[in-house]
Image: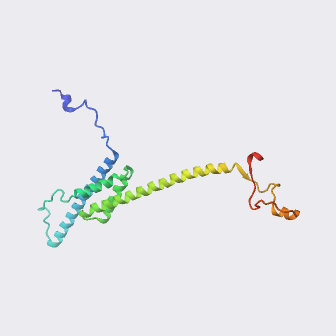
Amino acid sequence: MSLASWFRWNEPPNRISQRNPTEMVVETLMMELSWQIKEAEKQQRERENEYRKIKTGVDYGWLVSYPKQSYDISPGERLQLEDMCTKIHPSYCGPVILRFRQLTAEYEPEVQEVSRLFRSVLQEAVEKIKEEEDAKKLAKQWNTKNKTSLSLTTFKSRSKISPFISDIKTISEDVERGTQPTRRVWSMPEFRNAKDY
């Protein structure tokens, strides 16, 4: 048996797995949730220990052994949260985590409240994404409408309105001459093509 197989020198370097970005977002956000749950448990234990110290006046913390993680969210709730995480665009993953950390630091929730807080942050992000998509759609529609209206204005600019041309008859000229006006509507200006000039 050769030593090269033991040290694996001949193998190509490990590459980052070519996973779907959505899967990576879900995994990252769910890891953040589980970490925040662990932190909330730790804070809750510390509060309980401080309460016991105050109540009894003696520190028995060195006698107590704690389980690694005593609280876990239900599988149904986990699936719902994972489904909500799939709606988060990868560019929003970082801001969602920052917002979640900010709210957990601000409110210091109990262990059971962490998943609800996480759900509210996800809903807030999904609504923000939806608003931005709607704004982009409106902007796109507006841009396409402006392009068509610009083409209409260039079409309309070919025919010019010439209200000051001398051969345009007005009511005041007819009154001055004392002639009967023709049956033409006098409030409308006369239209001429650019070819006539």
The quarter of the displayed image where residue 109 is located: bottom left
The x and y percentages for residue 48 are 19, 67
Residue drawn where x is 52% and y is 53% of the image = 141
**Who's the residue at 19% across and 30% down the image?**
5
Q: Quadrant of the N terminus?
A: top left
Front residue of 14/147: it is: 147
Q: Outermost residue, right direction? A: 177
Residue in view at x 76 percent, y 54 percent: 162
Residue at the top extreme, as displayed: 2
Q: Residue furthest front?
A: 183
Number of marks: 0
Q: Residue 173's x, y, as percent?
A: 84, 62
Q: Is residue 25 left or right of residue 52?
A: right
Q: Position of residue 83 (x, y in %)?
A: 31, 54
Q: Is residue 172 left or right of residue 117?
A: right
User: Along the horizontal axis of the image, is 197 left or right of 103?
Assistant: right
Camera-side residue of 87 and 39: 87
Query: In the orientation shown, which residue stands out farthest toward the bottom?
Result: 55
Q: Where residue 152 sits in the image (x, y, percent)?
A: 63, 50
Pick the front one: 64 or 183:
183
Instruction: Look at the picture and state if 93 lies above or below 64.
Output: above
- Say if 75 sits above or below 14 in the image: below
In this figure, which colouring scheme has been used for the structure? Answer: rainbow
Q: Is residue 163 above or below residue 197?
A: below
Quadrant of the rendered image containing residue 104? bottom left
The residue closer to the viewer here, 104 or 47, is 104
